[in-house]
Amino acid sequence: MAKTKVTFECMACGYQSPKWMGKCPNCGAWNQMEEVIEHKAKGPKTTITDTSSSQKVEKLKDVTKETTPRSTTYIKEFDRVLGGGIVPGSLILIGGDPGIGKSTLLLQVCALLSQHDNVLYISGEESVRQTKLRADRLSEDAGELSVYAETNLQIIHETVKKIEPKFLVIDSIQTIFHPEVTSAPGSVSQVRECTQELLRMAKSMNIATFIVGHVTKEGQIAGPRLLEHMVDTVLYFEGDTHHSYRILRAVKNRFGSTNEMGIFEMRQSGLKEVLNPSEMFLEERTKNVAGSTIVATMEGTRPLLVEVQALVTPTSFHNPRRTSTGIDQNRLSLLMAVLEKKQGLLLQQQDAYIKVAGGVKLDEPAVDLSVVISIASSFSDKATRGDDCYIGEVGLTGEVRRVARIEQRVQEAAKLGFKRVIIPKNNIGGWDFPPNIEILGITNIAEAIRIAFN
């Protein structure tokens, strides 16, 4: 009988200890150490994938350059986030909250790809009949899609070798188990070992593989952080289950930019891509009200117009509240200090609430001017013009600094019917203004406030 050994493993980072500890010494997480029973193997553990094909060491100058074409998913928003399409042999991890639509998105992608290529969809959470019921609700025809319900990694590997698909989907990695690893499916050891085998499979057989991963209550993909380092691309599918819009972001991409964002709308027939998100974010706004401004921000290569709302009210406490949604709270405190110092606005006795409509997170400096104007508008209870757009970075001395890609931002504002754009004066020059829109250059926030409330 094989000898057993009891160890304790951290469920957050995979650190192993011979005794239980309340706090993991590696990652600092509390109450994450769980007991793991290890069976001493009689021989060395073998890998599932075939290692018969040997590689040789080559000089980089001797390696022939091959242009591998990307495969389109026939969904423009999905291709944009991936960097232009799917790279053959890549391993892509998609994470998101339960019920947000990860499986629906991948099933739609597989349905479109299966009309042109061989696609295998492996479900570890649903049976084949349940997957069929979910596919019938989609608008795309998934009749040519190959579906397989299995959780044993060895059987999955044999099936993949037999079918030889061009695209492979694993839904989800927390349900797949390696038969030679004694821990339960979903544990750190299982997730790490299964992902390593899938990585070998994707690279050796040149199969583009998608992995679905559940997230923890902190919003991180469940399992060790090593999981995100092993894959080529990490995508997060975000959104509120009470709203219909979903946002797909790339937090890691070896074959493209990590600043791109794709927007989808959840409907009864599946996810529908939103090709003009600026119009979607502005469709419910109320024009000519105090505390509301429009900013032209950049999400990767895409200009995006969103509404910044501010509410400034007197406080009854000694410490006023500074609450922000979609904007860094430290940036909000900084901008309010600049307004108080340079413009004389008495904000020490005011609560301030800032929100970016639509659930978008703005982290670039170009949104500073819009936040400043919205705070000043709400504080003085004076409405700004509904056809104004504000772009600019605000410094600590009240100056307005230049921003990047000003031409794309202004063109997006002109396309949606805005009449005036207030931008830094240093951004004027070297590019052609769109017709039917007025460009106003400013150097400090005093000029911006004077123009906004004129």
Image (spheres, helix red, strand yellow):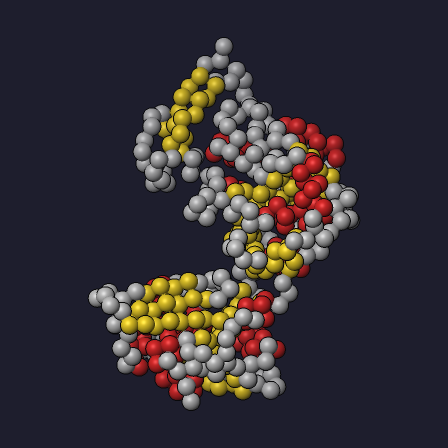
- Residue 231 visible in image: no
Q: Is residue 97 left or right of residue 336?
A: right
x and y, in percent, of residue 372 in the image: 38, 75
Up/down of 77 relative to 157, above or below:
below
Up/down of 178 relative to 217, above or below:
above
x and y, in percent, of residue 234 in the image: 55, 49
Look at 50% across and 78% down and name the residue there. 287
Work out whether residue 301 or residue 111 is closer to the camera in this orientation and state it. 111
Locate the C terminus and report the quarter of the image it occupies: bottom left
Q: Find residue 206 and report its image quarter.
A: top right
Work out whether residue 26 or residue 445 is closer to the camera in this orientation and state it. 445
Q: Is residue 431 left or right of residue 161?
A: left
Q: Find residue 399 and report its image quarter.
A: bottom left
- Residue 352 visible in image: yes
Work out whether residue 189 or residue 48 is closer to the camera in this orientation and state it. 189
Up/down of 403 relative to 66, above or below:
below
x and y, in percent, of residue 26 in the image: 36, 38
Work out whether residue 127 or residue 82 is closer to the camera in this orientation and state it. 127
Q: Find residue 443 and report its image quarter.
A: bottom left
Residue farthest to the left, as pictured: 318
Look at 49% across and 13% down and name the residue there. 2
Look at 56% across and 71% down and name the residue there. 283
Look at 70% across and 36% down and name the residue there. 129
x and y, in percent, of residue 321 in the image: 30, 65
Q: Is residue 211 left or right of residue 308?
A: right
Counting labels gives 0
